[in-house]
């Protein structure tokens, strides 16, 4: 008899997952924003899109001892998701990044004519499909809503083709028209640029790296995972290429820039930003990627009210090569990282806490740490983060929910910080998880306007 864990089914409403379709020609990862709306047929159509040559009638997943369990109906699909959510929360409780949900398509014996009506699941990432917004019952049967994001066409490229694109650059250096400098960080310089062929504005981060060609190749192959990142809360990656000893990383341009240049952010705006940041991180964690550099300058906003994360550490080689040039410790790092211990998801959660505390106060929460020259500091200066109790908010200035959220994220013991499920379910996040991008949009526009008029008066 099937007993479904109702708590886990509730988690399905809020948490995106990654389904890895295991095919003979390789793995295919798909992000599903709203697993509770997923049904068996939609998933089957998605599998058939990926494996048009096979007659897939069902699929299997593996239980904890490796036995294969077949899924042929909506009910069995729900049981699989419930099982998966249990596994995921156990992995997270142990500070591990959850594995994607692996499914193994099962082909029927007789080939037949399939999909004769040419039905397609929505295969393009589309903000309108962001299932964080309440989906009215009347839409619950709408095919495009069920599977929010199945493999994008780029995922269908073979690994060799991807490598070629990455090595040569889908975007060539000579097709980029550099405009103003957007900022300069510890690793490199970011420019606003125009891609002449693609006719779009880009942000190009240029990082000088004196490394061998072997290491360059390794970085390129590590960056391949960026093609798989497909979330409205993660900056879109277009291409990366080396010219001589510089790597250029081309991403989507965000016209509101990063949050570090905004002054105090009011709580009703900060709440919506926090929802996007938590969703972006939950997505990365579901891909087994730790961000490793959560801080206000890596949270970008635009005038449409979107909030996206950038600069997460997908390439160990890139991170190591930059670290060799720029020595110092990041002030947003969790105490366990500062002291050189092992760390996991919980370390990203600490960085969320300290970042949002700074954004609410308009200053770095440890008054003894002054960040005049970016976020890298000598290790000794950051020792107070390891030794002292975490900072507290001034009494009465912020809501109880917000104060509780920050306090929980900044618990000194990593395991006492909220796990991803708990983050999404925290009252502060729930309160602002209303999909109201208008609030952020209006605030960004107003701040940009103020900045422009101040510049005009200088
Ligand atoms: P670090 O090097 O430690 O990450 P940082 O985040 O401040 O520090 P960069 O990542 O080099 O430095 O970014 C510099 C600045 O460029 C950012 O602070 C931000 O204002 C701007 N920027 C980066 N990416 C984009 C983007 N995609 N769209 C718009 N502005 C961006
Ligand atoms: Mg950055």
Image (tube, grey):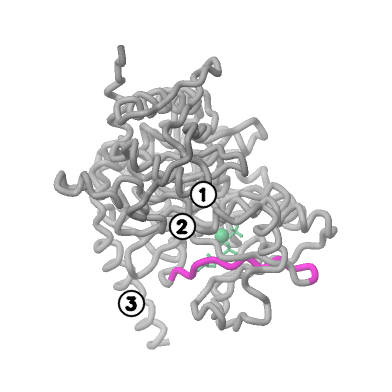
The reply to whether discs 1 and 2 touch (Cβ–Cβ < 8 Å) is yes
Task: Give the SS element for disc 3.
Answer: helix
The reply to whether discs 3 and 2 touch (Cβ–Cβ < 8 Å) is no
* Residue 87 visible in rendering: yes
* Residue 101 visible in rendering: no
User: x and y percent of residue 42 in the render?
Assistant: 35, 43
Q: Residue furthest top?
A: 1
Q: Which residue is mark 3?
A: 450
User: x and y percent of residue 232 in the render?
Assistant: 40, 56
Report crowding for label 3: few under 14, some 14 to 19, many 20 or more residues within 10 A (C-alpha): few
Q: Classify residue 289 by image quadrant.
A: top right
Task: Give the SS element for disc 1.
Answer: loop
Mark 3 to mark 1 CA distance (whole Å): 27 Å
**Viewport quadrant of the N terminus:** top left
Mark 1 to mark 2 CA distance (whole Å): 8 Å
Report crowding for label 2: few under 14, some 14 to 19, many 20 or more residues within 10 A (C-alpha): many
Foreground tag (3 vs 2): 2
Whether 68 is drawn above or below 337: the answer is: above
Mark 3 to mark 2 CA distance (whole Å): 20 Å
Q: Which residue is mark 2?
A: 299
Main SS class of the magenta portion in the image? strand
Q: Which residue is mark 1?
A: 294
Whether 377 is drawn above or below 57: the answer is: below
Q: Classify residue 444 by image quadrant.
A: bottom left
Which residue is at the front of the view, 235 or 70?
70
């Amino acid at each position: 008899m099937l007993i479904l864990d109702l708590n886990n089914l509730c988690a399905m409403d809020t948490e995106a997952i990654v389904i890895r379709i295991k095919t003979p020609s390789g793995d295919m990862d798909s992000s599903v924003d709203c697993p509770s709306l997923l049904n068996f047929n939609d998933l089957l159509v998605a599998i058939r899109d990926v494996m048009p040559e096979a007659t897939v009638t069902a699929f299997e997943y593996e239980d904890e001892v490796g036995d294969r369990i077949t899924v042929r109906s909506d009910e069995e699909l729900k049981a699989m998701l419930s099982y998966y959510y249990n596994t995921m929360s156990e992995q997270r409780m142990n500070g591990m990044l959850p594995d994607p949900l692996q499914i193994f398509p099962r082909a029927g014996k007789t080939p037949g004519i399939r999909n004769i009506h040419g039905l397609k699941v929505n295969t393009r990432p589309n903000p309108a499909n962001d299932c964080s917004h309440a989906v009215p019952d009347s839409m619950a049967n709408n095919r495009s809503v069920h599977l929010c994001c199945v493999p994008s066409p780029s995922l269908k490229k073979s690994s060799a083709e991807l490598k070629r694109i990455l090595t040569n650059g889908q975007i060539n250096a000579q097709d980029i028209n550099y405009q103003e400098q957007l900022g300069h960080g510890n690793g490199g310089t970011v420019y606003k640029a125009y891609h002449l062929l693609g006719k779009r504005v880009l942000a190009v981060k240029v990082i000088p790296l004196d490394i061998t060609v072997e290491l360059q190749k390794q970085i390129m192959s590590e960056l391949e995972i960026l093609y798989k990142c497909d979330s409205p809360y993660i900056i879109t990656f277009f291409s990366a290429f080396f010219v001589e000893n510089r790597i250029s990383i081309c991403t989507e341009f965000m016209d509101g820039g990063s949050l570090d240049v905004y002054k105090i952010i009011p709580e009703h705006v900060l709440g919506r930003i926090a929802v996007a940041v938590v969703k972006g991180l939950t997505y990365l964690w579901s891909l087994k990627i730790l961000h490793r550099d959560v801080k206000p300058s890596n949270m970008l906003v635009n005038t449409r009210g979107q909030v996206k994360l950038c600069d997460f550490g997908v390439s160990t080689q890139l991170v190591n090569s930059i670290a060799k040039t720029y020595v110092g410790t990041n002030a947003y790092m969790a105490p366990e990282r500062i002291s050189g211990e092992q760390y996991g998801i919980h370390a990203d959660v600490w960085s969320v806490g300290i970042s949002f505390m700074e954004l609410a106060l308009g200053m770095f929460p440890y008054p003894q740490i002054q960040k005049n020259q970016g976020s890298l500091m000598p290790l000794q200066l950051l020792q107070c983060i390891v030794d002292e109790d975490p900072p507290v908010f001034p009494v009465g200035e912020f809501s109880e929910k917000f104060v509780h959220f920050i306090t929980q994220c900044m618990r000194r013991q990593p395991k006492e910080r909220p796990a991803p499920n708990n983050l999404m379910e925290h009252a502060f996040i729930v309160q602002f998880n209303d999909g109201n991008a208008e609030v952020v949009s209006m605030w960004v526009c107003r701040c940009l306007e103020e900045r422009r008029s101040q510049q005009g008066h200088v």
